[in-house]
Image (cartoon, rainbow, N blue to C red):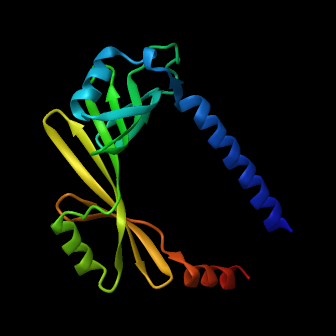
């Protein structure tokens, strides 16, 4: 009974935090509220794409991390714009600063092969695991430098894991193992 009460309390807390995150960390915008320099940069960076959603964030992005500026009021002047973009050559999200500089982009790739060095690294590190046809890439820009990471779902029988590799084929993060067998082990242990 205590487990159920604790679980219920944690679920309520998580729901409250998720709701608070939407209110605190994101503001939906109309196209007219986005600076012209940002819109011009999107046209240059993603030709033939359309913006389907406009958002502003009270955050600063440093390399691969986010720094949340909690005490900055959301008064209509934003430092960071988070846009959903769809097009022939891009489907994902792009983040721009107020000067129109591309900070990061996440692309959802369907049926597009991974770079060869990433595929080789996966084959070496995860023999016998299959690579999903779809993956996500995240690219972070800072001046002339850019770093790209590939988020890849691997499967082996009923199990699957999500791993992240950099553009050189180095694994930088491994997700949790999921699947039917893993779920059965957890249920036995809780038991």
Q: Is residue 164 above or below residue 23?
A: below
Residue 87 screen position, x and y as percent = 33, 41
Q: Quadrant of residue 129?
A: bottom left
Q: Position of residue 126 (x, y in %)?
A: 31, 80
Tell whether 105 sits left or right of 182: left
Q: Is residue 93 above or below residue 189?
A: above
Q: What residue is drawn where x is 39% and y is 31%?
A: 51
The vertical placement of 148 against 130, above or below, is above
Tell me: 121 left or right of 160.
Answer: left
The tally of labels here is 0
Pick the residue in front: 85 or 4.
Answer: 85
Q: Nearest the camera: 108 or 159?
A: 108
Q: Quadrant of the N terminus?
A: bottom right
Q: Quadrant of residue 155?
A: bottom left
Image coords of residue 112 (percent x, y): 27, 61
In the displayed orientation, state which residue is furthest to the right.
Answer: 1
* Residue that appears at 31% across and 44% down: 90
């Amino acid at each position: 009974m205590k487990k159920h009460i604790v679980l219920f309390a944690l679920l309520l807390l998580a729901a409250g935090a998720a709701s608070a995150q939407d209110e605190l960390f994101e503001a939906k915008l109309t196209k007219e509220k986005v600076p012209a320099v940002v819109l011009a940069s999107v046209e240059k960076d993603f030709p033939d794409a359309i913006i389907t959603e406009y958002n502003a964030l009270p955050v600063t992005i440093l390399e691969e991390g986010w720094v949340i500026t909690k005490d900055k009021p959301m008064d209509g002047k934003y430092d960071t714009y988070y846009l959903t973009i769809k097009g022939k050559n891009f489907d994902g999200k792009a983040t721009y600063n107020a000067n129109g500089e591309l900070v990061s982009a996440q692309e959802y790739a369907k049926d597009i092969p991974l770079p060869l060095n990433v595929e080789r690294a996966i084959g070496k590190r995860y023999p016998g695991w299959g690579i999903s046809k779809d993956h996500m890439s995240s690219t972070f820009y800072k001046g002339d430098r850019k770093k790209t990471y590939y988020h890849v779902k691997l499967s082996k029988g009923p199990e699957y894991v999500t791993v992240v590799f950099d553009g050189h084929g180095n694994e930088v993060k491994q997700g949790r193992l999921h699947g039917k067998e893993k779920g059965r082990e957890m249920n036995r242990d809780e038991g």
